[in-house]
Amino acid sequence: MVLSPCTWIVGIAIVLFAGWARAQYEALTTGACDLGIFYQAVQGWAYGGWPYVPIKGYVQLGDHFSPAFALLAPLVWIHDSAITLVYAQIVLICLSGVPIYHIFRRQHGVLVGSGMLIAYLGSHAVFGTVQFPVHEVMFGAVLLAWGMERMLADRWTQATILFAALITVKEDGGLMCVLIGLYALLNRRWKHSAFLIGWGATWFIVTLKFIIPNLNPGGFTYAKDYQASLHADSIFGGIPYMITHPLDILALMTDQPAKLETWQQLLIPVGFAALASPLALLIVPVMLSRMLSSRETQWSSGLYYDMPLIPILFAAVADGFRRIGGWVDRARRLPAPADSDEKPAGSEGQTARRWWHVRTATIMAAIAAPVFIGFAVQDARDSQVVKWYQGTGYPFANASIVGEAEDALSKIPPGVPVRATNNMLVPLLPTNEVTLIGSNVDKGDWAILDAYNPSCPISPKEIPQIMRQLDEMGFRRVYETAKGRIVVLQRTAPATGPIRGTGTAS
Protein backbone atom coordinates (compact mmCIF):
# COMPACT_ATOMS: atom_id res chain seq x y z
CA MET A 1 0.00 0.00 0.00
CA VAL A 2 1.39 3.39 -1.06
CA LEU A 3 0.67 6.22 1.36
CA SER A 4 0.02 9.71 0.06
CA PRO A 5 2.46 12.55 0.86
CA CYS A 6 -0.23 13.99 3.11
CA THR A 7 -0.14 10.91 5.34
CA TRP A 8 3.63 11.02 5.65
CA ILE A 9 3.78 14.75 6.37
CA VAL A 10 1.02 14.69 8.98
CA GLY A 11 2.42 11.53 10.58
CA ILE A 12 5.91 12.99 10.89
CA ALA A 13 4.51 16.22 12.35
CA ILE A 14 2.54 14.27 14.99
CA VAL A 15 5.61 12.28 16.03
CA LEU A 16 7.87 15.35 16.26
CA PHE A 17 5.38 17.45 18.20
CA ALA A 18 4.48 14.54 20.49
CA GLY A 19 8.13 13.92 21.40
CA TRP A 20 8.62 17.50 22.46
CA ALA A 21 5.28 17.68 24.29
CA ARG A 22 6.03 14.56 26.32
CA ALA A 23 9.41 15.99 27.37
CA GLN A 24 7.70 19.22 28.44
CA TYR A 25 5.06 17.28 30.37
CA GLU A 26 7.54 15.01 32.15
CA ALA A 27 9.62 18.04 33.18
CA LEU A 28 6.66 19.31 35.27
CA THR A 29 6.40 22.40 33.08
CA THR A 30 2.64 22.09 32.59
CA GLY A 31 0.15 23.32 35.15
CA ALA A 32 -3.41 24.25 35.97
CA CYS A 33 -3.82 26.72 33.09
CA ASP A 34 -5.12 25.22 30.97
CA LEU A 35 -4.14 21.55 31.12
CA GLY A 36 -5.31 20.99 34.69
CA ILE A 37 -8.59 22.82 34.11
CA PHE A 38 -9.53 21.01 30.92
CA TYR A 39 -8.37 17.65 32.23
CA GLN A 40 -10.63 17.95 35.26
CA ALA A 41 -13.44 18.93 32.90
CA VAL A 42 -12.87 15.82 30.78
CA GLN A 43 -12.68 13.70 33.94
CA GLY A 44 -16.03 15.20 34.88
CA TRP A 45 -17.52 14.27 31.52
CA ALA A 46 -15.99 10.78 31.70
CA TYR A 47 -16.96 9.78 35.23
CA GLY A 48 -19.74 12.10 36.32
CA GLY A 49 -21.39 13.31 33.14
CA TRP A 50 -20.82 16.94 34.18
CA PRO A 51 -17.56 18.93 33.72
CA TYR A 52 -17.06 20.23 37.25
CA VAL A 53 -13.58 21.74 37.71
CA PRO A 54 -12.33 21.89 41.33
CA ILE A 55 -9.51 24.20 40.27
CA LYS A 56 -12.07 26.81 39.23
CA GLY A 57 -14.72 25.96 41.82
CA TYR A 58 -17.46 25.64 39.19
CA VAL A 59 -18.20 23.76 35.98
CA GLN A 60 -16.02 24.41 32.95
CA LEU A 61 -19.05 25.51 30.89
CA GLY A 62 -19.28 28.54 33.15
CA ASP A 63 -15.85 29.73 32.02
CA HIS A 64 -16.05 28.99 28.30
CA PHE A 65 -18.86 27.07 26.62
CA SER A 66 -16.81 24.12 25.32
CA PRO A 67 -18.88 20.91 25.51
CA ALA A 68 -16.70 19.54 22.69
CA PHE A 69 -14.32 18.31 25.41
CA ALA A 70 -16.86 15.59 26.19
CA LEU A 71 -15.58 13.88 23.01
CA LEU A 72 -12.29 13.18 24.81
CA ALA A 73 -13.97 11.26 27.65
CA PRO A 74 -13.45 7.85 25.97
CA LEU A 75 -9.71 8.58 25.77
CA VAL A 76 -9.62 9.12 29.54
CA TRP A 77 -11.39 5.80 30.02
CA ILE A 78 -8.57 4.20 28.08
CA HIS A 79 -5.70 6.09 29.72
CA ASP A 80 -6.51 8.32 32.67
CA SER A 81 -3.67 10.83 32.44
CA ALA A 82 -3.40 14.47 31.48
CA ILE A 83 -0.88 13.56 28.77
CA THR A 84 -3.84 12.02 26.92
CA LEU A 85 -5.24 15.51 26.29
CA VAL A 86 -1.82 16.77 25.20
CA TYR A 87 -1.57 14.03 22.58
CA ALA A 88 -5.18 14.59 21.49
CA GLN A 89 -4.46 18.25 20.79
CA ILE A 90 -1.37 17.44 18.73
CA VAL A 91 -3.24 14.88 16.65
CA LEU A 92 -6.21 17.17 16.02
CA ILE A 93 -4.07 20.19 15.14
CA CYS A 94 -1.99 18.14 12.69
CA LEU A 95 -5.10 16.54 11.19
CA SER A 96 -6.47 20.03 10.52
CA GLY A 97 -3.79 20.21 7.83
CA VAL A 98 -5.37 17.35 5.85
CA PRO A 99 -8.18 19.49 4.37
CA ILE A 100 -5.63 22.21 3.54
CA TYR A 101 -3.73 19.62 1.53
CA HIS A 102 -6.92 18.57 -0.29
CA ILE A 103 -7.90 22.16 -1.09
CA PHE A 104 -4.64 22.77 -2.97
CA ARG A 105 -4.17 19.24 -4.34
CA ARG A 106 -7.61 19.27 -5.91
CA GLN A 107 -6.89 22.51 -7.76
CA HIS A 108 -3.15 22.37 -8.37
CA GLY A 109 -1.80 18.86 -7.84
CA VAL A 110 0.03 16.77 -5.26
CA LEU A 111 3.26 18.78 -5.14
CA VAL A 112 1.52 22.07 -4.47
CA GLY A 113 -0.80 20.40 -1.96
CA SER A 114 2.17 18.89 -0.12
CA GLY A 115 4.03 22.20 -0.07
CA MET A 116 1.06 24.09 1.31
CA LEU A 117 0.53 21.40 3.95
CA ILE A 118 4.15 21.74 5.09
CA ALA A 119 3.76 25.52 5.20
CA TYR A 120 0.57 25.16 7.24
CA LEU A 121 2.02 22.73 9.77
CA GLY A 122 5.15 24.86 10.05
CA SER A 123 3.23 28.07 10.66
CA HIS A 124 3.66 30.10 13.83
CA ALA A 125 0.05 29.35 14.77
CA VAL A 126 0.56 25.57 14.77
CA PHE A 127 3.83 25.79 16.69
CA GLY A 128 2.35 28.27 19.17
CA THR A 129 -0.60 25.97 19.80
CA VAL A 130 1.30 22.73 20.34
CA GLN A 131 3.73 24.52 22.66
CA PHE A 132 0.74 25.24 24.91
CA PRO A 133 -0.41 21.88 26.35
CA VAL A 134 -4.13 22.06 25.60
CA HIS A 135 -6.78 24.51 24.46
CA GLU A 136 -10.20 24.37 22.81
CA VAL A 137 -8.73 25.69 19.53
CA MET A 138 -7.83 22.07 18.70
CA PHE A 139 -11.50 21.43 17.89
CA GLY A 140 -12.07 24.76 16.16
CA ALA A 141 -9.11 24.33 13.81
CA VAL A 142 -10.33 20.93 12.58
CA LEU A 143 -13.92 22.04 12.08
CA LEU A 144 -12.94 25.27 10.31
CA ALA A 145 -10.38 23.58 8.06
CA TRP A 146 -12.72 20.79 6.95
CA GLY A 147 -15.62 23.22 6.64
CA MET A 148 -13.56 25.45 4.35
CA GLU A 149 -12.49 22.45 2.27
CA ARG A 150 -16.07 21.25 1.84
CA MET A 151 -17.26 24.77 1.06
CA LEU A 152 -14.61 25.31 -1.63
CA ALA A 153 -15.52 21.89 -3.02
CA ASP A 154 -19.08 23.23 -3.36
CA ARG A 155 -20.41 20.76 -0.78
CA TRP A 156 -22.31 23.36 1.15
CA THR A 157 -24.53 21.05 3.21
CA GLN A 158 -21.52 19.15 4.55
CA ALA A 159 -19.74 22.43 5.20
CA THR A 160 -22.76 23.83 7.03
CA ILE A 161 -22.88 20.83 9.38
CA LEU A 162 -19.19 21.28 10.22
CA PHE A 163 -19.53 25.02 10.77
CA ALA A 164 -22.65 24.52 12.91
CA ALA A 165 -20.59 22.32 15.26
CA LEU A 166 -18.39 25.34 16.09
CA ILE A 167 -20.89 26.36 18.76
CA THR A 168 -19.65 23.40 20.86
CA VAL A 169 -16.06 24.68 20.84
CA LYS A 170 -16.43 28.09 22.45
CA GLU A 171 -19.10 30.74 22.89
CA ASP A 172 -17.77 32.81 19.98
CA GLY A 173 -18.35 29.84 17.66
CA GLY A 174 -21.87 31.16 17.18
CA LEU A 175 -20.48 34.46 15.96
CA MET A 176 -18.28 32.64 13.44
CA CYS A 177 -21.37 30.75 12.20
CA VAL A 178 -23.09 34.09 11.59
CA LEU A 179 -20.09 35.43 9.66
CA ILE A 180 -19.88 32.31 7.50
CA GLY A 181 -23.63 32.55 6.97
CA LEU A 182 -23.13 36.05 5.57
CA TYR A 183 -20.46 34.68 3.24
CA ALA A 184 -22.94 32.01 2.13
CA LEU A 185 -25.41 34.81 1.45
CA LEU A 186 -22.88 36.44 -0.90
CA ASN A 187 -22.70 33.12 -2.74
CA ARG A 188 -26.50 32.91 -2.99
CA ARG A 189 -26.72 29.85 -0.76
CA TRP A 190 -29.95 31.05 0.76
CA LYS A 191 -30.91 28.03 2.87
CA HIS A 192 -27.41 27.46 4.22
CA SER A 193 -27.06 31.16 4.94
CA ALA A 194 -30.35 31.40 6.80
CA PHE A 195 -29.57 28.35 8.90
CA LEU A 196 -26.05 29.42 9.86
CA ILE A 197 -27.07 32.98 10.72
CA GLY A 198 -30.07 31.86 12.80
CA TRP A 199 -28.25 28.97 14.45
CA GLY A 200 -25.13 30.97 15.25
CA ALA A 201 -26.94 34.07 16.56
CA THR A 202 -29.23 31.98 18.77
CA TRP A 203 -26.41 30.02 20.39
CA PHE A 204 -24.22 33.07 20.77
CA ILE A 205 -26.93 34.88 22.72
CA VAL A 206 -27.92 31.81 24.73
CA THR A 207 -24.36 31.00 25.80
CA LEU A 208 -23.36 34.57 26.71
CA LYS A 209 -26.60 35.70 28.32
CA PHE A 210 -27.88 32.53 29.97
CA ILE A 211 -25.60 29.47 30.13
CA ILE A 212 -22.27 31.01 31.17
CA PRO A 213 -23.60 33.60 33.66
CA ASN A 214 -25.77 30.98 35.37
CA LEU A 215 -22.96 28.44 35.71
CA ASN A 216 -20.30 30.90 36.87
CA PRO A 217 -20.62 32.42 40.37
CA GLY A 218 -18.97 35.60 39.07
CA GLY A 219 -21.05 35.90 35.91
CA PHE A 220 -19.35 36.17 32.53
CA THR A 221 -15.68 36.49 33.48
CA TYR A 222 -14.58 38.43 30.41
CA ALA A 223 -17.29 41.11 30.42
CA LYS A 224 -14.93 43.94 31.36
CA ASP A 225 -12.27 43.39 28.72
CA TYR A 226 -13.48 46.32 26.58
CA GLN A 227 -14.14 49.01 29.16
CA ALA A 228 -10.83 50.77 28.51
CA SER A 229 -10.95 50.63 24.71
CA LEU A 230 -14.69 50.77 23.91
CA HIS A 231 -16.12 52.09 27.20
CA ALA A 232 -18.46 49.12 27.24
CA ASP A 233 -18.86 45.75 28.96
CA SER A 234 -18.61 43.76 25.74
CA ILE A 235 -17.47 43.98 22.14
CA PHE A 236 -21.12 44.34 21.07
CA GLY A 237 -21.82 47.00 23.64
CA GLY A 238 -18.93 48.91 22.11
CA ILE A 239 -20.34 48.91 18.56
CA PRO A 240 -21.77 52.47 18.90
CA TYR A 241 -18.33 53.70 19.94
CA MET A 242 -16.71 51.87 17.01
CA ILE A 243 -19.14 53.49 14.58
CA THR A 244 -18.66 56.99 15.96
CA HIS A 245 -14.88 56.77 16.47
CA PRO A 246 -13.53 54.77 13.50
CA LEU A 247 -10.12 56.45 13.51
CA ASP A 248 -9.65 55.61 17.19
CA ILE A 249 -10.50 51.98 16.44
CA LEU A 250 -8.02 51.82 13.57
CA ALA A 251 -5.36 53.25 15.84
CA LEU A 252 -6.13 50.73 18.58
CA MET A 253 -5.75 47.86 16.13
CA THR A 254 -2.04 48.62 15.72
CA ASP A 255 -1.03 50.76 18.71
CA GLN A 256 1.21 48.14 20.35
CA PRO A 257 4.29 46.30 18.99
CA ALA A 258 2.66 42.97 19.86
CA LYS A 259 -0.38 43.84 17.74
CA LEU A 260 1.76 44.82 14.75
CA GLU A 261 3.72 41.60 15.05
CA THR A 262 0.51 39.56 15.05
CA TRP A 263 -0.75 41.25 11.88
CA GLN A 264 2.62 40.62 10.23
CA GLN A 265 2.69 36.99 11.33
CA LEU A 266 -0.77 36.40 9.90
CA LEU A 267 -0.40 38.14 6.55
CA ILE A 268 3.26 38.14 5.48
CA PRO A 269 3.76 34.31 5.54
CA VAL A 270 0.84 33.95 3.11
CA GLY A 271 2.13 36.79 0.95
CA PHE A 272 -1.04 38.85 1.49
CA ALA A 273 -2.59 36.54 -1.13
CA ALA A 274 -5.49 35.81 1.22
CA LEU A 275 -6.67 39.40 0.79
CA ALA A 276 -7.74 38.58 -2.77
CA SER A 277 -10.60 36.49 -1.37
CA PRO A 278 -13.65 37.70 0.56
CA LEU A 279 -12.98 34.77 2.91
CA ALA A 280 -10.29 36.90 4.51
CA LEU A 281 -13.04 39.16 5.88
CA LEU A 282 -13.95 36.34 8.27
CA ILE A 283 -10.89 37.11 10.38
CA VAL A 284 -11.76 40.80 10.84
CA PRO A 285 -14.33 40.46 13.68
CA VAL A 286 -12.04 37.98 15.44
CA MET A 287 -9.12 40.39 15.20
CA LEU A 288 -11.33 43.26 16.39
CA SER A 289 -12.25 41.30 19.51
CA ARG A 290 -8.58 40.49 20.15
CA MET A 291 -6.89 43.78 19.38
CA LEU A 292 -9.47 45.85 21.28
CA SER A 293 -9.32 43.65 24.37
CA SER A 294 -7.48 44.83 27.47
CA ARG A 295 -5.95 41.34 27.91
CA GLU A 296 -2.47 41.66 26.49
CA THR A 297 -2.19 37.92 25.83
CA GLN A 298 -4.95 38.32 23.21
CA TRP A 299 -2.62 40.51 21.15
CA SER A 300 0.14 37.90 20.97
CA SER A 301 1.07 35.79 17.96
CA GLY A 302 3.09 33.42 20.15
CA LEU A 303 0.21 31.50 21.69
CA TYR A 304 -2.83 29.71 20.25
CA TYR A 305 -5.01 32.70 19.37
CA ASP A 306 -4.02 32.66 15.69
CA MET A 307 -4.82 28.96 15.24
CA PRO A 308 -8.51 29.39 14.29
CA LEU A 309 -7.49 32.02 11.72
CA ILE A 310 -4.84 30.03 9.86
CA PRO A 311 -7.26 27.54 8.20
CA ILE A 312 -9.34 30.49 7.03
CA LEU A 313 -6.30 32.31 5.63
CA PHE A 314 -4.99 29.26 3.77
CA ALA A 315 -8.45 28.63 2.31
CA ALA A 316 -8.58 32.31 1.36
CA VAL A 317 -5.20 31.95 -0.39
CA ALA A 318 -6.55 29.10 -2.52
CA ASP A 319 -9.70 31.06 -3.30
CA GLY A 320 -7.65 34.19 -3.99
CA PHE A 321 -5.41 32.35 -6.45
CA ARG A 322 -8.50 31.00 -8.19
CA ARG A 323 -10.04 34.45 -8.54
CA ILE A 324 -6.85 36.19 -9.69
CA GLY A 325 -6.02 33.27 -11.96
CA GLY A 326 -9.46 33.41 -13.53
CA TRP A 327 -9.01 37.08 -14.43
CA VAL A 328 -5.60 36.47 -15.94
CA ASP A 329 -6.72 33.34 -17.79
CA ARG A 330 -9.51 35.29 -19.43
CA ALA A 331 -6.94 37.86 -20.56
CA ARG A 332 -4.82 34.94 -21.88
CA ARG A 333 -7.96 33.71 -23.68
CA LEU A 334 -7.73 30.27 -22.15
CA PRO A 335 -10.91 28.18 -22.27
CA ALA A 336 -12.94 27.74 -19.10
CA PRO A 337 -11.54 25.02 -16.81
CA ALA A 338 -12.81 21.51 -17.38
CA ASP A 339 -15.28 20.02 -14.93
CA SER A 340 -13.86 17.67 -12.32
CA ASP A 341 -15.68 14.69 -13.84
CA GLU A 342 -14.28 15.34 -17.33
CA LYS A 343 -11.79 12.84 -18.78
CA PRO A 344 -8.12 13.53 -18.08
CA ALA A 345 -5.94 15.25 -20.63
CA GLY A 346 -4.88 12.99 -23.48
CA SER A 347 -7.90 10.70 -23.18
CA GLU A 348 -10.36 10.08 -25.96
CA GLY A 349 -12.43 13.11 -26.81
CA GLN A 350 -10.05 15.63 -25.29
CA THR A 351 -7.04 17.29 -26.89
CA ALA A 352 -3.63 17.15 -25.22
CA ARG A 353 -2.88 20.21 -23.15
CA ARG A 354 0.10 22.41 -23.92
CA TRP A 355 2.40 23.78 -21.25
CA TRP A 356 1.14 27.29 -21.90
CA HIS A 357 -2.36 26.09 -21.08
CA VAL A 358 -1.42 25.70 -17.41
CA ARG A 359 -3.79 27.74 -15.31
CA THR A 360 -2.46 30.96 -13.82
CA ALA A 361 -3.75 29.94 -10.39
CA THR A 362 -1.62 26.79 -10.51
CA ILE A 363 1.46 28.79 -11.54
CA MET A 364 0.87 31.19 -8.65
CA ALA A 365 0.36 28.33 -6.19
CA ALA A 366 3.48 26.53 -7.42
CA ILE A 367 5.52 29.69 -6.82
CA ALA A 368 3.83 30.42 -3.50
CA ALA A 369 4.28 26.96 -1.97
CA PRO A 370 8.09 27.12 -1.56
CA VAL A 371 7.84 30.78 -0.51
CA PHE A 372 5.31 29.88 2.18
CA ILE A 373 7.53 26.98 3.30
CA GLY A 374 10.42 29.44 3.57
CA PHE A 375 8.41 31.69 5.89
CA ALA A 376 7.35 28.66 7.95
CA VAL A 377 10.95 27.47 8.30
CA GLN A 378 12.02 30.94 9.36
CA ASP A 379 9.31 31.02 12.04
CA ALA A 380 9.91 27.44 13.18
CA ARG A 381 13.62 28.10 13.64
CA ASP A 382 12.82 30.34 16.62
CA SER A 383 10.33 27.95 18.23
CA GLN A 384 10.95 26.05 21.45
CA VAL A 385 10.22 22.78 19.69
CA VAL A 386 12.94 23.13 17.06
CA LYS A 387 15.46 24.48 19.55
CA TRP A 388 14.77 21.52 21.84
CA TYR A 389 15.48 19.06 19.03
CA GLN A 390 18.61 21.00 18.11
CA GLY A 391 19.76 21.06 21.73
CA THR A 392 20.10 24.85 21.67
CA GLY A 393 17.01 25.80 23.67
CA TYR A 394 16.72 26.62 27.33
CA PRO A 395 16.11 23.56 29.55
CA PHE A 396 12.60 23.07 30.85
CA ALA A 397 12.12 25.13 34.01
CA ASN A 398 11.55 22.25 36.45
CA ALA A 399 13.56 19.48 34.78
CA SER A 400 16.16 19.50 37.57
CA ILE A 401 13.64 18.60 40.30
CA VAL A 402 11.73 15.78 38.60
CA GLY A 403 13.32 13.07 40.73
CA GLU A 404 12.73 14.74 44.09
CA ALA A 405 9.25 15.81 42.98
CA GLU A 406 8.35 12.17 42.35
CA ASP A 407 9.49 11.28 45.87
CA ALA A 408 7.43 14.10 47.35
CA LEU A 409 4.33 13.27 45.33
CA SER A 410 4.54 9.61 46.40
CA LYS A 411 3.97 10.68 50.04
CA ILE A 412 0.42 11.80 49.23
CA PRO A 413 -2.13 8.96 49.39
CA PRO A 414 -4.53 8.55 46.45
CA GLY A 415 -8.14 9.58 46.82
CA VAL A 416 -7.60 12.52 49.19
CA PRO A 417 -8.24 16.16 48.25
CA VAL A 418 -4.95 18.02 47.81
CA ARG A 419 -3.94 21.68 47.70
CA ALA A 420 -1.01 22.12 45.30
CA THR A 421 1.11 24.77 43.67
CA ASN A 422 0.89 24.96 39.91
CA ASN A 423 3.67 22.64 38.75
CA MET A 424 2.88 20.00 41.40
CA LEU A 425 -0.77 19.81 40.40
CA VAL A 426 -0.89 17.89 37.11
CA PRO A 427 0.78 14.61 38.26
CA LEU A 428 -1.87 14.24 40.99
CA LEU A 429 -4.91 14.70 38.75
CA PRO A 430 -5.56 11.03 37.89
CA THR A 431 -5.69 9.94 41.55
CA ASN A 432 -6.76 12.96 43.58
CA GLU A 433 -9.11 15.94 43.58
CA VAL A 434 -6.57 18.75 43.29
CA THR A 435 -7.06 22.47 43.82
CA LEU A 436 -4.64 25.31 43.29
CA ILE A 437 -3.04 27.04 46.27
CA GLY A 438 -3.79 30.75 46.02
CA SER A 439 -7.06 30.31 44.14
CA ASN A 440 -9.31 30.86 47.18
CA VAL A 441 -11.13 27.60 46.36
CA ASP A 442 -8.33 25.25 47.43
CA LYS A 443 -9.35 22.57 49.89
CA GLY A 444 -8.22 19.34 51.52
CA ASP A 445 -6.11 18.07 54.41
CA TRP A 446 -3.01 17.55 52.29
CA ALA A 447 -0.83 20.14 50.55
CA ILE A 448 2.27 20.12 48.36
CA LEU A 449 4.25 23.26 47.53
CA ASP A 450 7.15 24.19 45.33
CA ALA A 451 8.63 26.96 47.47
CA TYR A 452 11.01 28.23 44.75
CA ASN A 453 8.75 28.23 41.69
CA PRO A 454 5.08 28.03 42.76
CA SER A 455 3.95 29.82 39.58
CA CYS A 456 0.36 30.89 38.89
CA PRO A 457 -1.38 32.41 40.84
CA ILE A 458 1.22 33.08 43.56
CA SER A 459 4.87 34.17 43.50
CA PRO A 460 7.84 32.93 45.59
CA LYS A 461 7.64 36.02 47.81
CA GLU A 462 4.13 34.96 48.89
CA ILE A 463 5.29 31.53 50.09
CA PRO A 464 6.07 32.67 53.69
CA GLN A 465 2.54 34.07 54.00
CA ILE A 466 1.06 30.87 52.53
CA MET A 467 3.06 28.74 54.96
CA ARG A 468 1.85 30.82 57.92
CA GLN A 469 -1.76 30.45 56.81
CA LEU A 470 -1.35 26.68 56.40
CA ASP A 471 0.23 26.48 59.85
CA GLU A 472 -2.71 28.37 61.37
CA MET A 473 -5.04 25.88 59.67
CA GLY A 474 -3.24 23.00 61.41
CA PHE A 475 -0.96 21.79 58.59
CA ARG A 476 2.36 20.23 59.59
CA ARG A 477 5.29 19.11 57.43
CA VAL A 478 5.45 15.40 56.71
CA TYR A 479 8.12 15.52 54.02
CA GLU A 480 10.64 18.01 52.67
CA THR A 481 13.24 17.60 49.94
CA ALA A 482 16.93 17.97 50.78
CA LYS A 483 17.15 21.68 49.92
CA GLY A 484 13.66 22.47 51.16
CA ARG A 485 12.28 23.31 47.73
CA ILE A 486 9.32 20.91 47.78
CA VAL A 487 7.27 20.57 50.95
CA VAL A 488 4.46 18.11 51.70
CA LEU A 489 2.07 18.96 54.55
CA GLN A 490 -0.88 17.29 56.25
CA ARG A 491 -3.45 18.83 58.55
CA THR A 492 -2.83 17.01 61.84
CA ALA A 493 -3.01 19.79 64.46
CA PRO A 494 -5.91 21.89 65.76
CA ALA A 495 -6.57 24.98 63.68
CA THR A 496 -5.76 28.34 65.25
CA GLY A 497 -7.11 30.29 62.29
CA PRO A 498 -9.92 30.01 59.75
CA ILE A 499 -9.92 26.94 57.51
CA ARG A 500 -10.36 28.33 54.03
CA GLY A 501 -8.64 28.89 50.73
CA THR A 502 -5.20 30.33 51.18
CA GLY A 503 -5.41 32.93 48.45
CA THR A 504 -7.20 36.23 48.09
CA ALA A 505 -8.93 35.87 44.74
CA SER A 506 -9.77 33.26 42.15
Image (spheres, grey):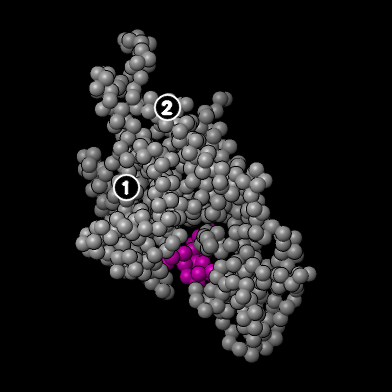
Amino acid of disc 2: Ala
Q: Disc 1 versus disc 2: distance between alpha carbons?
A: 25 Å
Query: Which element is circle 2 on?
Result: helix
Question: Does residue 18 appear anywhere in the picture?
Answer: no
* Residue 61 lies in the magenta-colored region: yes
Instruction: Give the x, y percent position of residue 386.
Output: 60, 44
Q: For the N terminus, which image quadrant?
A: top right
Instruction: Decide: is 243 above or below 474.
Output: above
Instruction: Give the x, y percent position of residue 385.
Output: 59, 47
Outermost residue toward the right? 482
Which residue does the numbered mark 2 point to in the structure image?
366
Residue stretch rendered in magenta on the structure: 45-63
* Residue 407 lies in the magenta-colored region: no
Between marks 1 and 2 in the image, the one whose residue lies nearer the viewer: 2
Question: Does residue 381 appear anywhere in the picture?
Answer: yes
Instruction: Give the x, y percent position of residue 210.
Output: 33, 67
Which residue does the numbered mark 1 point to in the structure image?
282
Query: Which element is circle 1 on?
Result: helix
**Between residues 139 and 301, which one lies in front from this camera angle?**
301
**Between residues 137 and 327, which one lies in front from this camera angle?**
327
Mark 1 / mark 2, whichever is N-terminal: 1
**Left or right position of 88 against 143:** right
**Left or right position of 49 against 331:** right
